[in-house]
Image (cartoon, rainbow, N blue to C red):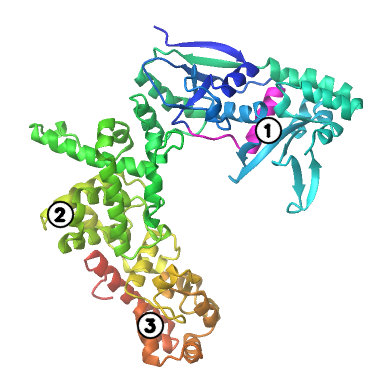
């Protein structure tokens, strides 16, 4: 039996059904409109009667029952809760056209660089009549006050803020395309000389919009849940691929559960946002819906594996623990509902663990991906992670992943293996996880660590801070000053200017070996002087007044060799600090990494 029809519908008829709510969106669909350039291009395409692609709609009232919402820009209070059709594909085009043509409010769009902006769209009538090749220039985008400004907003280049100004300058608002009668009367009042040009414009441009036919593929209400979900996965080849979260939302919605509401919350249905609850913790602000689904999938597939074993299955009959995309897409709704609250609590415990390791902001975390197995592990451990032996193993695993740089790239397999092996290791000291055994750190890696965005760089910086590194100038530990919003940064220990004057190449002086976190104030005082000079200046400052041994305590807190620093011995400093940092790294990963000869 055919489950779809192909037809055409006029643009005005389609937009009317959208504005009155006969056509709406499944609630899990992305809420957006195209960027400004795409919107203008779309208007030009219709003005020239070019095809803009088919739209896919689905009849409501069948087996698949989605929660719904109106297209962006239309108030839910003004539409019915029982639409006749839902938009499955073509949302961006229809939303853009609805906001630009069918609504008088400004279009909520963005620039090509992603900055949110509000725009009204106009046709410059005279330019539009010069020929199709001028239509791109004829479409004008003005701000929410219906003006175009330049010189940082000081100069007004085009002012269409009143109907009189529109008529006098013969700029026709796109939000009057579907009903130009009042604008025509106003034109007759304010600029009757422009009537002839407008009538030509009405016939050519407005006529193209009114007569425009959009191809429609309509899925019948008899379409199965599986077919609808497959459609969602396939129809986005021309746009942005649907995420795992959106596909899961589609699947769960067909069972009457709104995953979008659970994650993002809903004011309409008075549902609190799980994402917002997590984001109240600084370290969890970057947790994505996919991270959350992966953690639940890990726990579900682990439980499934043990059930398979209990049922007597062997070999390939035992389904593995997994966090891969295919496994997430197979996650049953019942499993999500069973684990969701526990996993949320697991993420909160993970943030407590990370805070204990001296991570205080999301930007400090070396790998966002490592929080997934950590949260899943915490879900299973509960309060046990605080037990000294368990905590020691957990910390060693974490730092092995960071300093071994094992959580970059595709990590789905490692995530699953780590959860299994960590839980085994907590019970059996000999069952060391592969992430711990695989972790290694070549001392030469320190010389090549220059980017503060790299995982190992971030990790080493935090290791130094958690040992209690204090500022060179201000009283207090660096991390305390950071929470007090004192200006901090990672600066050269031997200043750049001094290094260049002494023919030390950037690849050497820019490495992490020659850097440490200090305050902006201290760095300004250091300037480009030799260490022996700037230390004397710092120590003798009237607001500091430190003896050598007191300053040495601060330097030691940064793992800086004081003797070589005070004698401006860069080669000796470089090798000595390299050894000190390697000792810190070896302590964190629980194994020797530095060769005996070194």
The answer to which of 539 and 556 lies nearer the viewer is 539
Q: Main secondary structure of the magenta part?
A: helix
Q: Is residue 244 visible?
A: no
- Cβ atoms at labels 3 and 2 below 8 Å apart: no
Is 204 positioned to the left or the right of 54 in the image? Answer: right
- Cβ atoms at labels 1 and 3 below 8 Å apart: no
Instruction: Say which of marks 3 and 2 sits in front.
Output: 3
Tell me, yes or no, whether the highlighted magenta stretch contains residue 228: no
> For mark 2, does the 10 Å Cα neighbourhood hold few (<14), some (14 to 19), or many (20 or more) residues?
some
Q: Is residue 123 above or below residue 408?
A: above
Q: Give percent across and percent down for residue 351.
A: 32, 56
Tell me, yes or no, whether the highlighted magenta stretch contains residue 32: yes
Q: Give percent across and percent down for residue 527.
A: 55, 80
Q: Which residues are magenta?
A: 30-47
Q: Which mark is residue 40?
A: 1
> For mark 1, does the 10 Å Cα neighbourhood hold few (<14), some (14 to 19), or many (20 or more) residues?
many
Q: Give percent across and percent down for residue 561.
A: 36, 83
Disc 3 or 2, which lies upstream in sequence? Answer: 2
Q: Is residue 7 above or below residue 478?
A: above
Which residue is under mark 3?
554
Is 71 positioned to the left or the right of 576 in the image? Answer: right
Is 231 positioned to the left or the right of 43 in the image? Answer: left
Disc 2 or 1, which lies upstream in sequence? Answer: 1
Which residue is under mark 2?
425
């Amino acid at each position: 039996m055919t489950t779809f029809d192909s037809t055409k519908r006029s643009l005005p008829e389609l937009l009317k059904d959208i504005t009155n709510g006969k056509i709406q969106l499944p609630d899990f669909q992305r809420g957006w409109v195209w960027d400004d350039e795409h919107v203008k291009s779309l208007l030009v395409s219709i003005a020239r009667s070019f095809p803009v692609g088919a739209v896919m709609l689905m009849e409501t009232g069948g087996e698949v029952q989605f929660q719904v919402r109106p297209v962006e820009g239309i108030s839910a209070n003004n539409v019915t809760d029982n639409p006749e059709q839902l938009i499955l594909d073509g949302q961006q085009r229809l939303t853009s056209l609805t906001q630009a043509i069918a609504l008088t409010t400004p279009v909520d769009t963005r620039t090509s660089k992603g900055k949110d902006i509000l725009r009204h769209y106009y046709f410059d009538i005279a330019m539009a009549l010069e020929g199709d090749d001028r239509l791109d220039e004829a479409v004008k985008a003005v701000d929410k006050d219906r003006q175009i400004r330049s010189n940082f907003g000081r100069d007004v280049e085009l002012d269409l803020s009143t109907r009189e100004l529109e008529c006098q300058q013969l700029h026709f608002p796109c939000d009057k395309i579907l009903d130009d009668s009042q604008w025509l009367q106003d034109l007759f009042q304010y600029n009757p000389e422009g009537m002839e040009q407008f009538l030509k414009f009405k016939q050519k441009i407005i006529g193209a919009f009114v007569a425009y036919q959009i191809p429609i593929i309509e899925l019948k209400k008899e379409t199965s849940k599986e077919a609808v979900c497959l459609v969602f996965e396939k129809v986005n080849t021309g746009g942005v691929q649907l995420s795992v979260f959106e596909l899961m939302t589609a699947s769960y919605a067909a069972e009457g559960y709104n995953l979008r509401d659970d994650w993002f919350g809903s004011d309409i249905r008075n549902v609190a946002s799980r994402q917002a609850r997590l984001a109240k913790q600084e370290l969890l602000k970057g947790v994505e819906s996919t991270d959350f689904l992966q953690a639940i999938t890990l726990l579900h597939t682990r439980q499934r594996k043990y059930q398979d074993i209990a049922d007597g299955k062997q070999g390939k009959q035992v389904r593995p623990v997994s966090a891969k995309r295919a496994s997430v897409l197979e996650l049953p709704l019942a499993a999500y509902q069973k684990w969701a609250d526990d996993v949320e609590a697991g993420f909160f415990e993970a943030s407590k663990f990370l805070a204990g390791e001296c991570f205080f902001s999301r930007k400090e975390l070396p790998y966002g991906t490592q929080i997934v197995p950590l949260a899943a592990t915490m879900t299973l451990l509960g309060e046990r992670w605080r037990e000294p032996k368990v905590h020691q193993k957990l910390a060693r695993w974490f730092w092995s992943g960071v300093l071994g740089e094992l959580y970059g790239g595709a990590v789905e397999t490692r995530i699953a293996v780590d959860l299994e092996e960590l839980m085994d290791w907590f019970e059996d000291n000999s069952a060391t996880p592969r992430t711990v055994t695989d972790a290694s750190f070549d001392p030469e890696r320190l010389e090549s660590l220059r980017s503060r965005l790299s995982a190992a760089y971030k990790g080493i910086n935090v290791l130094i801070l958690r040992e209690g590194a204090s500022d060179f100038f201000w009283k207090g530990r660096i991390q305390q000053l950071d929470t007090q919003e004192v200006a901090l940064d990672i600066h050269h220990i031997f200043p750049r200017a001094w290094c260049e004057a002494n023919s030390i190449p950037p690849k050497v002086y820019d490495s992490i070996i020659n850097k440490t976190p200090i305050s902006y104030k201290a760095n300004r005082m250091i300037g480009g002087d030799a260490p022996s000079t700037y230390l004397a200046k710092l120590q003798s400052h009237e607001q500091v007044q430190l003896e050598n041994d007191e300053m040495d305590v601060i330097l030691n807190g940064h793992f800086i060799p004081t003797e070589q620093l005070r004698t401006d011995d860069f080669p000796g400093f470089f090798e000595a600090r390299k050894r000190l940092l390697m000792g810190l790294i070896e302590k964190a990963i629980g194994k020797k990494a530095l060769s005996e000869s070194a």
